[in-house]
């Protein structure tokens, strides 16, 4: 199973909000132009990010979106969990019908389930150590290199 693209889109959104703030009105249309998706997709992810307390959305002509927390307090795990990338404990989709009359098929879940959960937990632990501030800093370095 693949992690939903909502995760990478959400990281893109949060990075754009910080890097582009003050340069333009940041709304679903302008951010959709950066991400390369329909503004409806961006609005749906905005709702998830807002519900998780990661962004603030102001409606109206002078509205827009801004970060609700400092960038060094937002982890990639926060983003991952906010956009329901994968149901908890379900990163790996196990094949549905292993053959119970086969000794491997009969035992593969027992052998693999704990290991797969351990892998998922390790990934989430690593995501906790990666901050939005790291992503933004690296993005700003790339932008500054382009102007050289």
Image (tube, rainbow, N blue to C red):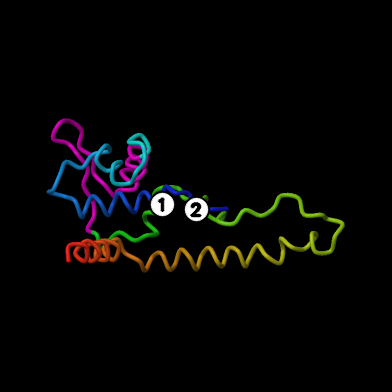
Few, some or many residues within 10 Å of mark 1 (<14, 14–19, 20+):
many
- Asked which quadrant contains residue 107, the reply is bottom right
Few, some or many residues within 10 Å of mark 2 (<14, 14–19, 20+):
some
Q: Is residue 60 above or below residue 7?
A: above
Residue extending farthest to the right is 101
Residue under the point 34% across and 48% down:
52
Residue under the point 20% across and 42% down:
26
Residue under the point 48% across and 65% down:
123
Residue 97 is situated, as x and y percent measured from the top left of the image, at 76, 50
Q: Which residue is mark 2?
A: 3
Q: Is residue 143 left or right of 93 when viewed as pictured? A: left
- Asked which quadrant contains residue 71, the reply is bottom left
Q: Is residue 67 magenta?
A: yes
Q: From the viewer's side, name the closer residue of 6 and 75.
A: 6
- Asked which quadrant contains residue 57, the reply is top left
The number of numbered badges drawn on the structure is: 2
Quadrant, the C terminus: bottom left
Distance from label 2 to label 1 (Cα)? 7 Å
Q: From the viewer's side, name the closer residue of 126 and 16.
A: 16
- On residue 106, the disc is none
Residue 70 is situated, as x and y percent measured from the top left of the image, at 22, 58
Bounds of the magenta span? 42-70
Per the image, label 2 sits on a secondary structure element best described as: loop
Residue under the point 27% across and 38% down:
28
Per the image, label 1 sits on a secondary structure element best described as: helix
- On residue 7, the disc is 1
Q: Is residue 80 above or below residue 39?
A: below
Residue extending farthest to the top is 60
Q: Is residue 116 magenta?
A: no
Residue 111 is situated, as x and y percent measured from the top left of the image, at 71, 67
Residue 25 is situated, as x and y percent measured from the top left of the image, at 16, 41
Q: Are marks 2 and 1 in contact (CB under 8 Å)?
A: yes
């Amino acid at each position: 199973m693949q992690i939903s693209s909502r995760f990478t889109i959400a990281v893109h959104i949060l990075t754009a909000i910080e890097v582009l703030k003050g340069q333009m009105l940041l709304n679903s249309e302008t951010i959709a132009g950066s991400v390369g998706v329909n503004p409806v997709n961006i609005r749906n992810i905005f709702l998830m990010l807002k519900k998780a307390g990661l962004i603030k959305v102001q409606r109206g002509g002078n509205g827009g979106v801004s970060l609700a927390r400092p960038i060094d307090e937002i982890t990639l795990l926060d983003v991952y969990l906010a956009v329901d990338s994968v149901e908890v404990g379900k990163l790996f989709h196990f094949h549905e019908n292993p053959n119970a009359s086969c000794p491997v098929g009969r035992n593969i879940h027992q052998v693999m389930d704990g290991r797969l959960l351990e892998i998922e937990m390790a990934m989430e632990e690593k995501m906790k150590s990666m901050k939005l501030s790291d992503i933004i800093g690296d993005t700003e370095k790339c932008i500054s290199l382009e102007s050289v």
